[in-house]
Amino acid sequence: MTRTETPWGPWEPAAPDEVTALFSSADTPWWIAGGHAIELAVGDSFREHSDIDVLLLRRDQRSVQRLLPTWEWWAADPPGTLRPWRPGETLPTDVHDIWCRPGPSAPWQIQIMLDEAEGQDWISRRCARVRRPIGRLGKLSPEGTPYLVPEVQLFYKAHRPRPKDEQDFRATLPSLDAGQRRWLARAIAEAYGEHPWHQSLR
């Protein structure tokens, strides 16, 4: 893991197995997201990571405060400021990210990402027309770590792909089956229109 400095203190992200240990007793669904989800999907570690993301459904947000009550939780208010997330507070719908650490002198270790849901369906916050059953949102690694399926993670990365997102797409593409490629191509078209990745997905 890479240590990085921010205006709000350093990041030393937890490893996926450490996150699994911390969240193992959670009573709501969660998934490793971001670049770590891609690596779990392809079964190989191929690049450095400056953070680690955990996806939760927005309706379950307060479960993490109960799960790790001694940790510090800070909400990322748009357009880019951090503030303490008060115990029991329900965050507004424009807050999608939460930084957390074991204590005030510790580095940041986990970023929580909040996504929408309706009944048994996950709904993308980027485009409400892009959705799928929650039961098909993630998979389990051989070690028992839940992670976001690659087509959903790549859908988010397609919004404004950075070099690391292009690297993740190239690494994942050979392992995507025809159904995953169709879903990703349709979701990208629905949310973003024509996209450079469409040619590869065909």
Image (cartoon, grey):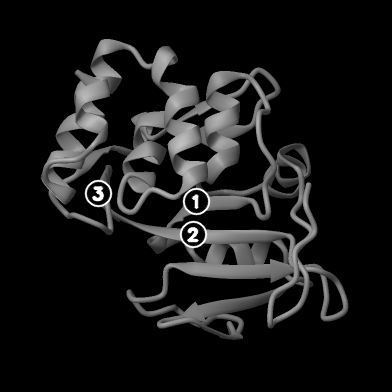
- Element at label 1: strand
Viewer-nearest residue: 3 or 100: 3
Task: Pick whichever of labels 2 and 3 is earlier in the sequence.
Answer: 2
> Going 44% across and 50% down the picture, which residue do you hit?
162
For the residues labelled 1 and 2, the Cα–Cα distance comes to 5 Å
- Element at label 3: loop
> Which numbered marker is on residue 119?
3
Disc 1 crowd rating (10 Å Cα; few below 14, some 14-19, many 20+) is many
> Going 68% across and 68% down the picture, which residue do you hit?
100
> Going 62% across and 19% down the picture, which residue do you hit?
43
Q: Check contact, mark 1 vs mark 2: CB within 8 A.
A: yes
Dot 2 amino acid type: Met
Residue 153 x/y as whole percent:
41, 40
| Left-right relation of 183 to 3 | left
Q: Is residue 188 visible?
A: yes
- Element at label 2: strand
Residue 68 x/y as whole percent:
72, 63
Task: Pick whichever of labels 1 and 2 is earlier in the sequence.
Answer: 1
Q: Identify residue for label 1.
A: 55
Q: Check contact, mark 2 vs mark 3: CB within 8 A.
A: no
Looking at the image, which residue sits at the far right?
Answer: 105
